[in-house]
Amino acid sequence: MNTRPVKQLKPFHMYIGSPIWTLKQICPCCNQGSSLILSTCDNCKKLMAICDEMGTVFIDARDISMDKISQADNEVCPFCQEKSTIRPAKDIEIIAIGLTPQDYE
Ligand SMILES: [Zn+2]
Ligand SMILES: [Zn+2]
């Protein structure tokens, strides 16, 4: 278990008006449901899930695991390292990686 403190990414309340999709499964870092926000990097278009409680970045939204969390500096994309490019994922992007509407809400 990684106990390194994690800072929040850019707060998602800045995106009022766009739908925010969360995975239905329980988050392994805080044991809460509906806290895994599906997010996309606007720069490299990769999809990830970010815990709304702890700010943990899960780099594979199809396989949420504490073994697959970002070790990158906070506020950067774990894939391309660009800053401030992460936004809520669109449903077509979520479906494109193989998730189905049963997986998120
Ligand atoms: Zn969590
Ligand atoms: Zn990126």
Image (cartoon, rainbow, N blue to C red):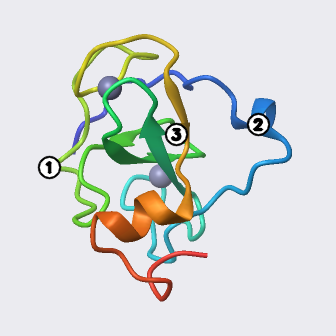
- Measuring from the top left, give residue 92's x and y in whole percent: 48, 64
Would residue 47 be seen by someone viewing this image from the given angle? yes
Q: Is residue 10 above or below residue 2?
A: above
Q: Which mark is residue 30?
A: none
Q: Would you call the spot at circle 2 few (<14 residues within 10 Å), some (14-19), or many (20 or more)?
A: few
Q: Earlier in the sequence, mark 3 or mark 1?
A: 3
Kindly identify the amino acid type of the residue bearing the numbered disc 2: Tyr
In the image, is 21 to the left or to the right of 62? right
Q: Give me the C-alpha separation between circle 2 and circle 1.
A: 29 Å
Could you tell me which quadrant the C terminus lies in? bottom right
Is the C-beta of the residue carrying label 3 under 8 Å from the nearest atom of ligand 1? yes
Ligand 2, seen in the image, is in the quarter at top left
Q: Is residue 49 above or below residue 92?
A: above
- Measuring from the top left, give residue 88's x and y in whole percent: 58, 45
- Measuring from the top left, give residue 16's x and y in whole percent: 84, 41
Q: Nearer the viewer, mark 2 or mark 1?
A: 2
Q: Residue at x 24, y 53 (%)?
A: 60
Q: Is residue 104 above or below residue 54?
A: below
- Measuring from the top left, give residue 1's x and y in whole percent: 21, 45
Q: Residue furthest right?
A: 17
Q: Quadrant of residue 57?
A: top left
Q: Earlier in the sequence, mark 2 or mark 1?
A: 2
Circle 3: element type: loop
Q: Which mark is residue 67?
A: 1
Q: Quadrant of residue 4?
A: top left
Question: Label 3 belongs to which residue?
Answer: 54
> Do the residues under discs 2 and 1 have CB atoms within 8 angstroms?
no
Question: Label 2 belongs to which residue?
Answer: 15
Q: Would you call the spot at circle 1 few (<14 residues within 10 Å), some (14-19), or many (20 or more)?
A: few
Q: Residue at x 48, y 89 (%)?
A: 102
